[in-house]
Amino acid sequence: MPQIDTVIRSRRVVTPKGVIPASVGLRGGRIAVVCDHGTPLPGAAEVDLGGVALLPGLVDADVAVHAPGQPLREGYLETDAAAVRGGVTSIAVAPGGGTGPHGAPTAITGEAALKDHQAAAAGIGVHVAFLGAVTDRSSSADLAELRSAGVAGFHCSLSDGGAESSAPIGDEQLRKTMVEAAAMGAPMLVHAEDPAELSPPDAPGNGALLAARPPRAERRGLERVVAAMRVAGTRTHITPFTAAECAALLGAARSIGVPLTAHTCPHYLCLPAEQVPDDAPGFGCRPPLRSAANRNALWSALLSDSDSAVRTIGSGHRPGTGVRALSWTLPALWTAARRRGLGLDRVTRWTSAEPAALLGLAGKGRIAPGADADLVAFDTDAPHAVPADDPGPYAGRQLTGRIVGTWIAGRQVFPPPR
């Protein structure tokens, strides 16, 4: 057998065949072999995790990397550090609110903005896929230019999308873009709150935000998306999906052959609005956190069957609105999932395999020979207290599960080598 760079052994390796004791051999940035736990492998280095689980690195399909006014490079560096702490090894960058090298907004609407992002992301550890931003001014040539330059898909919003630079699009542009995306084989990610159902909050805090952005905004937005999809047939992913009362609409669309799926976030699955202090800055989610009843119904939609339309779960990381959650995706989701008797195989399907498939990242999201050696060691039983001064939605909470190691392309990036 050729020389292995690193061997990682664990009694709980999450593979496409289930959670098994195994040894994983890494070579040249990829997984060379997955074999029985005790198999001797000629590795230059060896890591024995014991009972700590080995998972595929998380793939987050919808991340904003920077806040309004923040330099683009600074946003990428902060995002990279947060990602590797949380076992996130790949991100898809959605429109955000920062500024490029010359102070211009950084929504990826053309090749020049894409090059700015690529330059700002150069040299960071996490793998970055880029999503082209669609506005009412986007032309067919703009979309074709972005796709040929390497974007993994397109992102648009029917309203503000949670970012100042995310301009809303109308129905005509939505249909036109879907037709173009379908021809290019690219997925569409859509923030589906309808602006006609939104109003300015009359006070700070989640309570006022909840009143200003009711579930009917998502329902009306979903109806518009489904109508456009029936014309175009484009793979479309709603992000984020929060209003559980709309789950039946997702199911109905799929029953008539409309390829509609959805993405949600751990804070919608973990944090009911009744438990959120109105004066806390880390809950500026758009859509907002909803009720405990909605949270339970969202879990029911997620677990309804093996073909649930809610396919992916990611951080909802939006520094511009105060949602700094990238480091906590896995512990927060695992804390809630294990209470419902769910296993790591189900969790990693939502956080790794399905988002990798959505974005066309063939080497990501699984532990199997030939896949990229993007891995995370996760101690599922370790208590994990979120610092009280953490800027995200989990501040001060007691979670279960701790990331103890992250590898990207076979190189350990967390904890950093001494």
Image (cartoon, grey):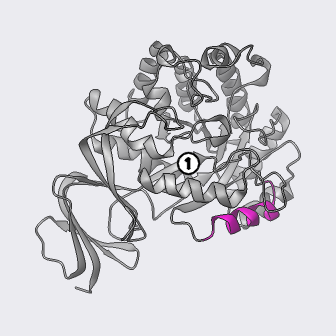
Q: Relative to residue 344, is residue 77 drawn left or right?
A: right
Residue at far left of view? 38
321 drawn magenta: no
Q: Report the magenta residues as a range.
A: 109-122
Residue 210's spot in the image, x, y percent?
Answer: 63, 16
Of the pair 360 and 395, the residue shown nearer to us: 395
Residue 102's spot in the image, x, y percent?
Answer: 84, 61
Q: Is residue 127 above or below residue 63?
A: below
Q: Is residue 270 above or below residue 106?
A: above
Picture quadrant of residue 299? top left
Q: Relative to residue 137, is residue 186 drawn left or right?
A: left
Residue position for label 1: 61
Q: Is residue 279 above or below residue 237?
A: above
Quadrant of the rendering where the C terminus is positioned: bottom left
Amino acid carrying label 1: it is Ala
Of the pair 220 and 191, the residue shown nearer to us: 191
Residue 159's spot in the image, x, y percent?
Answer: 76, 31
Residue at far front of view? 389
Picture quadrant of residue 26? bottom left
